[in-house]
Image (cartoon, rainbow, N blue to C red):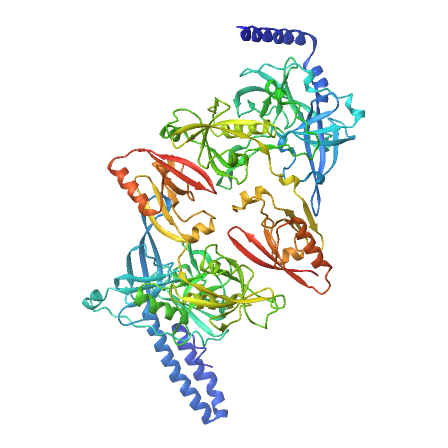
Amino acid sequence: MLVKMLPPSIMLKNSLRQVGSDWAIRIRFAGFVWNVAILAALVTSAQARASFDRLLEAVVRIDVRETSFEGGSSRLISGVGSGVILSKDGLVLTNAHVVSPQAVDIWVTLASLERVRAELLGWDHWTDLALLRLDMEDVKERKLRYSVAKFGRSDSLKPGQTVFAAGTPHGLSRTVTKGIISNKERYYRDSTGIRGYETGFFNTWLQTDAAINPGNSGGPLVDADGRVIGINTRTYLGADNLGFAIPEKTARQVMLALESYGEVKRSYIGISPGFLQDMEAFYELEANQGLLINSVDPGSPAAIAGIRASDIVLSIDGKHFDGRFPEQIPPIRNLIASYGVGEEISMEVKRGEEMFSVVVVTERLESRVGKEWAFEKWGLTVREVSRTFARERQLESDDGVVVIGTQSAFPAEKAGLRRGDVISKINQMELAGLDDLKGFYDAYESSPEALLMETLRNRTVSFKVIKP
Amino acid sequence: MTKRFIRSLAIGVIAIGILSSKAEFTLDELFEERRDSVLAVEFFVETEVDRRPVTVNGMVVSNDGVLQLAANAIPGWVSIDKLKEFKVYVLGESKAYDAEYLGSDRAYGWHFVQVEEVLRDRLKPVTDYQLAEMKTGQSLWGIGVAMKNLDFKPYFMRAEVSTIQLLPATVGFATREITSPGSILFDDSGAFAGWGTAPLNMERYLTIEGQLYQAYLRKPDQTTTFFVASELVKTFGGLPSSPDSNDMTWLGVVGLQTIDDEVAELMGLGDQAAISISQILNDSPAAEAGLRERDLIISIDGEPLKRYTPRRVAVADLEQQIAKRGIGETMKLGISRDGETLEVEIVLGQAPKPVRQASRFYFENLGFTIREFLVYDSVSMKLDVEPGETPGVITSFVKTNSNAHTGGAQMGDLIKEIDGVPIDHFDQAIALIEELEADDSKNEFVLLVARGADTSVLRIALK
């Protein structure tokens, strides 16, 4: 017990002294057995201290400059976060909301206060993770040293267990805060949580009361031995000590995929599950079984296969599961997502009294956020309309681009374009996507001529003229 | 030649009127007489859980005690049978007289209320007065109406004409507040000059503890804008046959937008005003006549669209021109389509049932109201509904802390299924829920509702 409760660095001397004095009195009574126990405890605590120190040496600060397309022009913005080195060859795990593919340069500050460049290997906003690699040539050349953190096991965590959040908020030195695991599988999802990208659909989160500051993002959540059991991601502003971290189990899988493929491939079938919560009786289900379908995306594989809202999926490829409560949903979503793209999934479905099987052919999962671009001379930034975005906005097709920003007194703003307008046609020609618009822009750049845009907002059509 | 003659004659007559009336009456005499052309009207809007009192002003428009109220005096979504206990008050008196709601004018939306007979003789219709000639800078006076706790006491107000605009109604703007909304104003000879509209929002900046705020302020009981009487009286007389009649005409187009001057120029329309059509509803007169989405309307019955300032007023003008016509009347629209001009003749149909006439049913024990699905719902919910198809019923009210509320029902939900049964008829939905409520073996039931692009399964407790 003593070892588990060991607090980090500064407290160490005190606690040893306490062990020496308070416990010494008891030892006389307890005799030999106690002596051995104390000795063992001291040895392990020293080891723990060493591994905790090693962890702190593996925590890095990350400075990012990235392109932002908000506001009608591309501009560089900078941000700071934390990360943790997880391999000798310089892999650094951090948050997707710290480093995104729009990063232009990434600087990592090691515990030795040396700075080294890093590159993004891949990101996964769904789990809020990004993987970087240090510039290893530079590391070797400058003989930079760092230590490597080790993963623990998030599965074996117990609520109430002491954990520490490490990071580099507001500066270079390492900050450690202490708390407990408040909840092992907190359900939290947000369809625009990471700069407009979705997050939390395929994983649950560790909840801790260890204080997580904004700059702590991407830093590790560790156990008393300094083993990484999660990556800190977010805190509830305005709430007291509600911090969330991605569990090690998810982080390890995502890290592997990002290292190998630069992305996590996931499949999509177009269902939104609900929580069955006490509805088993209504649906005449065997106890603790089934997944309630709240919503089916029109035109999605599930819709094509004939699945409808309020159906109950009883099994996926013969596997039964329990979808009664919110935290049980992400693993089921993850199961579906883990199928290959184009693979067949057979599902047993219950609709009222009726039971039947369907085969759903998966599609590739896409984010609601499409590719972004800036048209500087127009003072216009746009994003490609994705399938998900089109569905969300109830657009008739996923053609066109959506305005995400205009710069004041530039042609786009003067024409009356506003954030959220979908540009559907240019000079009476259908606009399929970003590349089409780039074509018109190039033509405009070489010979500026008035351009007629057709835009949609809430199914209302407007015409706008971009003038040189 | 004759026109000019008539005009000069009219001006002459008015001039004589001014001179003679100036000689005869003082302002306080005029005020004392004209205050009986305005009454305060009070009524209640009854909802599922409460009754809200509303007080507005109305002007007397006929000898048989008919008052005309502003179009916004009564919320458009309230069904007629939820408008209760119409009462009127003579300004400055506390006695309430009974009144009856007569309905609204289909073209302009004015509401009409008729007062009980005992009061009728005391009232002075505005149609008895001469009409004022309106000039910029002219001094006008109006009757302000105080709050109910002051017995709606009338008070004198004065301001000058600042400008007059076509919006598309002829609207006057005064240099400051000149009357109360729904009350009236005159020139110094006592000629009828205008009818107070809803007040405008005035942009203001507030500094509170060093923090700057932008605010829009508006006086609830005084206004600077008014309908110009000489044009307003031409719209009088649109009394409906019954309060609940639906003789509204429609075209069946949605998302009408005026196009900018630059767009018109680029489309080869020169300086011709034009209105673009975003959406054409299935089975509507516009669809039958062959109008297409993205068509540009450039003329009505051969008359080119007027170029208003601001431009968007043209849409209101078109809508009013449709509303003025009767069901079955035709309208010729000049259309510009792909650079070509054509004329389309449209037979105006009866507008779909308005929200205020929709059937509703309140389930008191469950705490929610369902309302029949209307054509307008398919527009606002962006549903592509086939003609004659009903995709469900609408949740139009949810009582706080009721079973429906706890179960997650929200106002505006489209209920698609009740306990697994697809809903395609309003009465069917009522029957199903009543059956569920009567079934003692049931503790709860399930609703499938659509909200935006998604659906949700809700569980509602029956007990």
User: Residue A202: horizontal and vertical position, in percent?
Assistant: 44, 65
User: Residue B123: horizontal and vertical position, in percent?
Assistant: 75, 21
Q: Quadrant of the C terminus of chain A?
A: top left
* Residue at far right of view: B118
Q: Residue at x 55, y 62 (%)?
A: A311
**Badge count:** 0
* Residue at far left of view: A141
* Direction from residue B108 to residue B39 in the image, left or right: right
Q: Is residue A211 visible?
A: no
Question: Is B58 located above or below residue B186 in the figure?
Answer: below
User: Residue B59: horizontal and vertical position, in percent?
Assistant: 68, 25
Q: As rendered, which of B140 and A22 lies closer to the eye?
A: B140
Q: As rendered, which of A103 and B436 lies closer to the eye?
A: B436
Question: Is B440 located above or below residue B173 in the figure?
Answer: below
Q: Quadrant of residue B432?
A: bottom right
Q: Is residue A35 visible?
A: yes
Q: Quadrant of residue B67?
A: top right
Question: Is B392 located above or below residue B228 in the figure?
Answer: below
* Direction from residue B277 to residue B134 in the image, left or right: right
Q: As rendered, which of B275 and B295 lies closer to the eye?
A: B295
Question: Is B261 located above or below residue A27 in the figure?
Answer: above
User: Residue A168: horizontal and vertical position, in percent?
Assistant: 36, 63
Q: Residue at x 68, y 64 (%)?
A: B443
Q: As rendered, which of B178 and B89 lies closer to the eye?
A: B89
Q: Residue at x 42, y 24 (%)?
A: B272
